[in-house]
Image: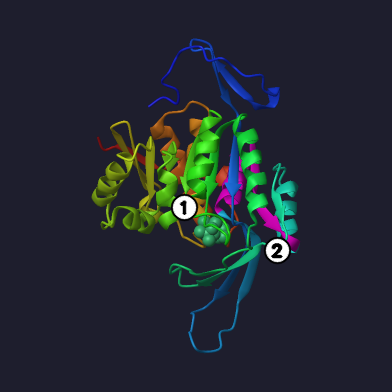
Amino acid sequence: MTLHTECQPKLVKPIELRCIASLIPHCGILIYAMIATVTLNPALDKSIYVDRLHPNDTNRILRVEVDAGGKGINASRVLKELGSETIALGFVGGKIGSFIEHVLENEGIPTDFVHVKADTRTNVCIQELTGSPPTMLNEPGPNIAEDDFDKLFDKVRKVARESSFVIFGGSLPPGVPKDIYKLLVNAAQESDSKAILDSDGEPMRLGMKSMPYMIKPNREEAERLVSLRVKNVGEAVRAANILARNGVKLVVISMGADGAVACSAGEVWQAVPPKVTPVSTIGSGDSMVAGIAHILSKGGSLGEALKLGAAAGAATAMTDGTEICSHHQVQDLLKKVRLERLS
Ligand code: TA6
């Protein structure tokens, strides 16, 4: 699958040089380097490590990790690490919002957040040393006023004009309409950018009505979307084909240690990373989205994109808390990812 099927020279709008990645001579179209991310509900991720979690009892905490979090923000951090140009948008507020902005600025990631009155939320993740899946306690987030999301829309429209992809990820904070992703995906795609949506439940379902270029549910999120079991590769392929009927060009279903399946234009691929010792899977799905967007924004194939996405997801699972993968870890795992075309 190539990134651009139309090969008519496209009327190219004047854009800043920093966004130009490459000019495809025979097509005369530009692929913009920039990949924007939009996180409506960022978070300070507080990972708490215990031997075993004993509910209704006193638990002695072994270690605490604190990091900037939120699906789009994690994706921007991985995109930067992989060498893509990225910018992070969304809503931030209070001291926690400033902390998140400083983390991104320290990593050289430009931001253009809407600053809201209330504090950005904190998500607590309780990790047992047994390696079992974490227990997540996610706060709802700050209430967003109408003029705040009007400001966000203007920023999304502007950044989309200079971006090959706009990645929308995560839950909705209180106060935003349930169909905000439908409106935002439209806004991005009306500005000739490709929207990637990674959310859950009703916001994801409504967002799909705008036919984003790509969606990336995990197994459980896919089950909720198609009301069918998604326990193995065959069931994931079935779910991906059903979701692709909604007009979404590329459906990726992430499956943890089993990697991911991707369905697009009749092609179905599976990428399985090598077995790794998971320390914290937080941000693995976001890393997969970043890896896929990174390759596609450079005109790479679906197979190459899925392979890098699987390597990035597995590499992040090897890191602490919301810490993201390193370029070196990703390249090391990439060689060992098993890629197979299923149909
Ligand atoms: O995918 C990881 C992550 O973004 C964490 O950083 C944590 O903040 C959580 O997911 C947020 O997800 P939510 O669906 O609540 O927006």
> Relative to residue 330, is residue 213 drawn left or right?
left
Find residue 81 and report its horizontal and vertical position in percent: 62, 42
Distance in Å between CA atoms under marks 2 and 1: 23 Å
Examine the rendering and report whether any part of residue 207 can be seen: yes
Relative vertical location of residue 266 with respect to residue 332 in this rendering, above or below: above
Examine the rendering and report whether any part of residue 319 can be seen: no
Q: Quadrant of the C terminus?
A: top left
Q: Amino acid at mark 1?
A: Ser
For this rendering, which residue is in front, 174 or 315?
174
Q: Residues within 10 Å of mark 1 (few under 14, many from 20)?
A: many
Relative vertical location of residue 331 with respect to residue 114 in this rendering, above or below: above
Q: How is the image coloured?
A: rainbow
Asked if the residues shown at circle 2 and circle 1 are in contact, with their CB atoms under 8 angstroms apart, the answer is no
Judged from the image, the quadrant occupied by ligand 1 is bottom right
Which residue corresponds to mark 1? 199
Q: Residues within 10 Å of mark 2 (few under 14, many from 20)?
A: some
Find residue 225 and report its horizontal and vertical position in percent: 34, 53
Secondary structure, mark 1, is loop
Task: Based on the picture, tell me whether residue 82 belongs to the magenta stretch.
Answer: yes
Nearer mark to the viewer, of 2 and 1: 2
Write the residue at 60% across / 64% down.
Answer: 141
Find residue 340 and report its horizontal and vertical position in percent: 31, 38
Q: Report the residue that reaches farthest toward the front.
A: 146
> Relative to residue 260, is residue 323 drawn left or right?
right
Q: How many marks?
A: 2
Quarter of image, res 3: top left
Which residue corresponds to mark 2? 118
Quarter of image, res 82: top right
Q: Amino acid at mark 2?
A: Ala
Find residue 262 and report its horizontal and vertical position in percent: 35, 40
Provide the residue span drawn in magenta: 71-94
Q: Under 8 Å from ligand 1: the CB of mark 1?
A: yes
